[in-house]
Amino acid sequence: QHIRQLFKDQYHNLEPGHLVAIGGTPTSAYCITQNLADYDPERVEGSVIHRKLLQNIFERLAQIPLAERIRQKLLPPGRADVFLGGLLILMEVMDVLNIEESRVSDRGLRYGVLEELALDLG
């Protein structure tokens, strides 16, 4: 509820559009949906992840205690303790923007800024 209210208060005037999610949460979530045992940046970059799949992942992993998620290596090293929080944030952003899917980028924020600048100049 806190995350939802924070985004509604801060970003209530954003218009629905396209979302490009970057970072470990969306890239890990995509790998989980595709059953990718080994991370493949070429498959991840530009992929699409759906809100319903994020919810399914959250519900499944939330049932598993943190120690068990780590022991079973269900997530990349160092992600097990922050992944569910990241999923909640991503899902709430999608809800506030009223979108059902997001692109996933492996490249990071600087690439998006450069692309936006290029579009503005072009």
Image (cartoon, rainbow, N blue to C red):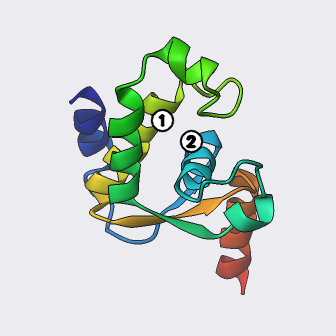
Q: Where residue 117 sits in the image (x, y, percent)?
A: 70, 70
Q: Mark yes or no: residue 44 visible.
A: yes
> Could you tell which of marks 2 and 1 lies nearer the N-terminus?
2
- The quadrant of the image that shows the C terminus is bottom right
Q: Secondary structure at mark 1?
A: helix
Judge whether 71 appears above or below 36 on screen: above
Check disc 2 and give the amino acid type.
Answer: Thr
Q: Mark yes or no: residue 88 visible.
A: no
- Residue beneath the point at 62% across and 52% down: 31
Judge whether 67 appears above or below 49 on screen: above
Q: Residue under circle 1?
A: 86
Mark linked to residue 7: none
Quarter of the image for residue 46 reads bottom right
- Residue beneath the point at 39% across and 72% down: 17
Quarter of the image for residue 7 reads top left
Q: Residue under circle 2?
A: 25
Q: Where residue 42 sits in the image (x, y, percent)?
A: 78, 66
| Cβ atoms at labels 2 and 1 below 8 Å apart | yes
Apparent side of residue 118 relative to residue 59 in the rendered image (left or right): right
Q: Where residue 89 sits in the image (x, y, percent)?
A: 40, 39
Check disc 1 and give the amino acid type.
Answer: Gly
Q: CA distance from mark 2 to mark 1?
A: 6 Å
- Within 10 Å of disc 2 (Cα), the crowding (few <14, some 14-19, many 20+) is many
Q: Where residue 23 sits in the image (x, y, percent)?
A: 64, 44
